[in-house]
Amino acid sequence: MFKSVAINLVRAVDEAARELRAIDDEVAGAKLNADVWSVKEILGHLVDSAANNHQRFVRAQGTTELSFPGYEQDAWVRAQDYQNTPWPQLVDLWVLYNYHLAHVIGRIPARAADVQVRIGGDDPIALSALAEDYVAHLRHHLLQIRQRKTMVISRNPDFADRDPR
Ligand code: NI
């Protein structure tokens, strides 16, 4: 079960990496308005998700029941100023972190599948479901990045020639 999640994660990263690397730094940093994440901020949020889930995946397998703090996603994105991280560096970080997480997930012992994990005030969920949710959340935001990139380019004619397609 964990092995198939790991394979699914590697596939998602492989599919996205090339497309992400083709995005222009300025397009990635463009804000449609102050309250909406840029492409950089969305990918930064995925780095935060990787970092938080890394802790959960490793710590949970050594026990039968575990509580973790949640994290305030907007505050994390703001605090780390992803807007001023060079885009290629952010993409490399995200790609390599997720290859490592796939490596980690693929090695979680099957007996840990039912470990109950409680995050913040949520109801506990099985570690296996947490791993599946991690990849689903990642795919959701990759789709959002593609949509946001298209919207940024369509609203700014100067970016049109930077659309890698
Ligand atoms: Ni999210």
Image (cartoon, rainbow, N blue to C red):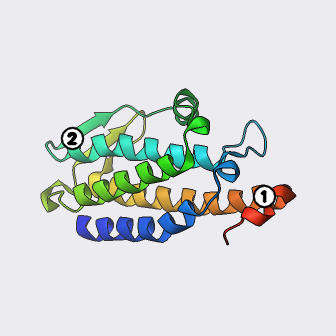
Few, some or many C-alpha atoms within 10 Å of disc 2 (few <14, some 14-19, many ≥20)? few
Residue at the spot of label 1: 159
Query: The N terminus lies in which quarter of the figure?
Result: bottom left
Q: SS of the residue at dot 1?
A: helix
- Give the number of the mark in front: 1 or 2: 1
User: Residue 121 falls in which quadrant of the image?
Assistant: top left
Residue at the spot of label 2: 59
Q: Amino acid at mark 1?
A: Phe
Give the side of residue 131 with respect to residue 90, left or right. left
Q: Is residue 129 visible?
A: no
Q: Is residue 75 visible?
A: yes
Above or below residue 26? Residue 106 is below
Residue 38, image x, y percentages: 67, 46
| Residue at the image position 24 percent from the left and 59 percent from the top | 103
User: Residue 100 falls in which quadrant of the image?
Assistant: bottom left
Residue 83, image x, y percentages: 62, 38
| 93, 62: nearer the viewer | 93
| Residue at the image position 55 percent from the left and 35 percent from the top | 77
